[in-house]
Amino acid sequence: MKNKTNIISKIKSRLTNDSKKEWPGLINAYKDFLPINDSTPIVSLKEGNTPLIRAKSLEKHIGRGVKIYLKYDGLNPTGSFKDRGMTMAISKAKEEGSKAVICASTGNTSASAAAYAKRAGMKAFVLIPDGYVAQGKLAQALVYGAEVLAINGNFDKALEMVQSIAEDYPITLVNSVNPYRLQGQKTAAFEIIDELGEAPEWLCIPVGNGGNITAYWMGFNEYFNQKKTKKLPKMMGFQALGSAPLVFNKLVKNPETIATAIRIGNPVNWKKAVEAKQNSLGSFEAVTESEIIEAYKLIGEEGIFCEPASAASVAGLIKIQKNLSDNSKVVCVLTGNGLKDPDCAINNNDAVFHTKLDPDLNKISKLMGF
Ligand SMILES: *Cc1c(COP(=O)(O)O)cnc(C)c1O
């Protein structure tokens, strides 16, 4: 009897605690692992703590008892993992007294920089490749009040320009060359281990500039050194075939892909990404446009909407599936939200979509198969 009361009171206290406990944002949650101090003004939109979702229909597709989890980082405040890095980069820029930030972007960095800069009371300038930024991302940068500079050139050119501007003028660069970005982003690896109790055997991740794969590897290693996991994953980085400099170890002058977030020919974290791959015994692989779209639809079948660049992680998993041992655990990172790129969604789906219908009950119910 006493035991029973005990259990009930434990459950009760857990319920009340859990319902009261609000996620404090990733800087507060992982303070001890991040380069901040008591005087760092924390600029946060409560980013992080994104769900790790079991992918049941993908598991059926792959078979052999392989467990597949999707780290849905598209559920961050501005819809991509960039928020993990931006909360750190903007907090540190504010601490250092910076009044303005700048970035080059394929879209998500600009959306995130704009939002966090606005919260910090700072000005944000974003350089984007004109015509190659998904609608949702551009809309965000504008609404969050960034000054948008669209250039006739690709991301690599834009990055070259902002690096030079940040050298010459009093403005903080918040691309992933900014070390605080990777510090914030490594917390995604912490969350995975906190939830699974250990690292997965494999991590599948899309690679553009190579910042995120570097950050995950850093995070897994820090937890490994703290004995919070006994194993480390193989880091599997996937690039689109038309913009795969790391796969072919060769700069790409005119990168092309539907996955605009990874349309990058000269990754700024090239060396670090290669180290993460080598030290983890992982690999870089290219996925085709149709493999990306196929994966994008399969993810949709899980009830999850990601952007095409994110689908590269699942496309890659499908490509390398024969390398997975039976019953192993895989985490695929879904880096961005599908709502970012509605054009891609409208043009690439297998849905039944009847248009221009008469509002006639009989006709419509017949069409529905009744
Ligand atoms: C930025 C981004 C990537 C690429 O990440 P890197 O750190 O540049 O390798 C992949 N997917 C999405 C949705 C992104 O926004």
Image (cartoon, rainbow, N blue to C red):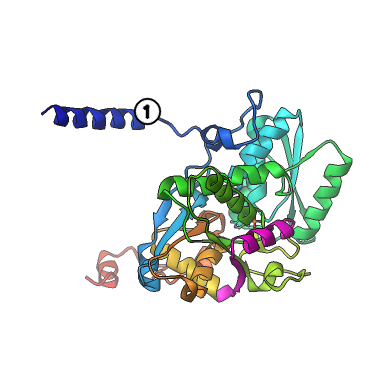
- Give the residue at x 70% y 56%: 272
Q: Which residues are magenta?
A: 268-290
- Give the residue at x 61% y 42%: 184
Vertical position of residue 338 compared to residue 240: above or below: above
Q: Position of residue 208 (x, y in %)?
A: 66, 60
Q: Nearer the viewer, residue 47 or 17?
A: 17
Q: Nearer the viewer, residue 68 or 274?
A: 274
The answer to whether residue 83 is left or right of residue 200 is right
Quadrant containing ligand 1 reads bottom right
Vertical position of residue 316 compared to residue 102: above or below: below
Asked whether residue 281 is drawn in magenta, I would say yes
The answer to whether residue 20 is left or right of residue 87 is left
10 Å crowding of disc 1: few (<14), some (14-19), many (20+): few
Q: Which residue is mark 1?
A: 20
Q: Of all residues shown, which one is farthest toward the left? A: 1
Q: Position of residue 219 (x, y in %)?
A: 57, 48
Q: Of all residues shown, which one is farthest toward the top? A: 39
In the picture, which quadrant includes the N terminus? top left
